[in-house]
């Protein structure tokens, strides 16, 4: 019986430690590349923005319904959503998550001086008769879509304006607190 044939068969049955380590390293590099390509933080911001967009659309319908039933729009104050709840247009005050650094009026880190914000959502009346609702968006995708780049003097908001009859995204300059005063195009 030839012993060399038996020992060579024993070593050919499995993978060596080096082969296994190489495969694990390749899989790690591929996984890291996929995670970088997906950018989970940006996906979370886009998901939050989708919720903000839905909220603005719901509130736009509620304000339109309020106007039909009451003959006027809610007063501009920090309880404007409470007025909609009292009128039966919405069931609860809607609160969107705060964006990374600014409110819907462009103020930083929650230092807003406006009294028209409730639930991180701004509300206003242009010329006292034309309502608008808006909230800041967080994702780089929406910022680029609205403002065309990473200009540090602008921020994107999702807004509904009755004068346009629809909702959309618009770029605001810091210091511009209402979407109707924007020098940028409503998209």
Image (cartoon, rainbow, N blue to C red):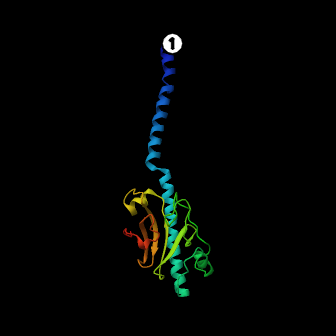
Residue at image point 48% right, 23% down: 12
Instruction: Give the SS element for disc 1.
Output: helix
How many numbered discs sit on the rendered protein? 1
| Looking at the image, residue 101 lies above or below residue 64 | above
Q: Nearer the viewer, residue 63 or 18?
A: 63
Q: Nearer the viewer, residue 11 or 44?
A: 44
Residue at image point 43% right, 75% down: 166
Residue 106 lies, in percent from the top left, at 49, 64
The C terminus - image quarter: bottom left
Residue 50 lies, in percent from the top left, at 49, 63
Residue 124 lies, in percent from the top left, at 50, 76
Q: Residue furthest bottom?
A: 71
Residue at image point 45% right, 35% down: 26
List the residue tagged with mark 1: 3
Q: Nearer the viewer, residue 60 or 26?
A: 60
| Looking at the image, residue 90 lies above or below residue 44 | below
Residue at image point 45% right, 50% down: 38
Q: Nearer the viewer, residue 14 or 2?
A: 14
Residue 141 lies, in percent from the top left, at 42, 58
Q: Residues within 10 Å of mark 1 (few under 14, many from 20)?
A: few
Q: Is residue 88 left or right of residue 139?
A: right
């Amino acid at each position: 019986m030839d012993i060399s044939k038996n020992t060579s068969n024993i070593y050919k049955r499995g993978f060596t430690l080096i082969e296994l380590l190489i495969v694990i390293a390749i899989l790690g590099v591929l996984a890291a590349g996929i995670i970088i390509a997906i950018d989970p933080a940006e996906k979370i911001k886009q998901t939050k923005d989708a919720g903000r967009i839905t909220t603005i659309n719901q509130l736009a319908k509620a304000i339109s319904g309020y106007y039909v039933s009451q003959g006027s729009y809610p007063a501009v104050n920090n309880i404007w959503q409470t007025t909609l709840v009292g009128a039966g247009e919405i069931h609860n005050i809607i609160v969107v998550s705060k964006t990374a650094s600014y409110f819907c009026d462009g103020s930083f880190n929650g230092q807003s001086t406006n009294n028209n914000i409730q639930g991180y959502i701004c509300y206003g009346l242009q010329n006292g008769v034309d309502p608008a609702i808006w909230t800041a968006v967080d994702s780089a995708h929406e910022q680029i879509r609205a403002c065309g780049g990473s200009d540090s003097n602008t921020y994107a908001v999702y807004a509904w304006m009755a004068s346009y009859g629809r909702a959309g995204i618009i770029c605001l300059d810091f210091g511009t607190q209402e979407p109707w005063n924007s020098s940028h195009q409503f998209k």
